[in-house]
Image: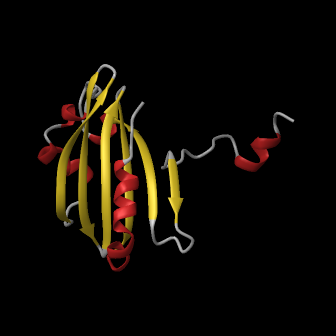
Amino acid sequence: DFNAGASLYGDKAKPRPFAARFASTDGSEVLSVVVRPTNQLKITFLEAQEITDLGSIKEAARIFVPGGATLYNARTIKIKEDEGFKTYYFYEFERDDQHIALMATVSSGKAIISGATAPCSKWDDDGVKLRSAAISLTAL
């Protein structure tokens, strides 16, 4: 029945904040992917076509790294593709006893962000795997 979903979900389904989200069984370690139009991240008339359109890695940190965070690492990573190189920004930081590894790029006017987080107490044991998962982001 075509109308069956309307009674369960109402007229409009709420947009999901994540494109993908994976969590440990206790929910303390999380890997998520978020896709947002670039003009939601930085006020501009034009959509960014490349991550560098959002600024240098230092300038873009204001978008991706929350205020009050302790930044441990920030790197620009270039990955070879068929049409040339794609630029990614990688940030690793701590905030509110959470350790976060974040990889971001821009494709077709959308920012694609992969982030892995865990409590600082668990990062020593699982940080390499979580960091690797965040860095494995590839925009197609």
Residue 96 visible? The answer is yes
Which residue is found at the position 17% from the left and 53% from the top? Answer: 74
Q: In which quadrant of the rendered view does residue 53 lie?
A: top left
Q: Position of 138 compared to 77: left or right?
A: right
Residue 65 visible? The answer is no
Q: Position of residue 79 (x, y in %)?
A: 28, 35
Question: In the rendered image of this protein, does residue 22 appear above or below residue 39?
Answer: below
Which residue is found at the position 31% from the left and 38% from the top? Answer: 105
Q: Position of 30 compared to 68: left or right?
A: right
Question: In the rendered image of this protein, does residue 3 appear above or below residue 82?
Answer: below
Quadrant of the image for the N terminus?
A: top right
Q: Position of residue 41 (x, y in %)?
A: 29, 41
Quadrant of the image for the C terminus?
A: top left
Q: Position of 28 compared to 86: left or right?
A: right
Q: In which quadrant of the rendered view does residue 51 lie?
A: top left
Q: Nearer the viewer, residue 115 or 17?
A: 115
Q: Residue furthest bottom?
A: 121
Q: Position of residue 58 (x, y in %)?
A: 12, 47
Q: Position of residue 114 (x, y in %)?
A: 38, 49
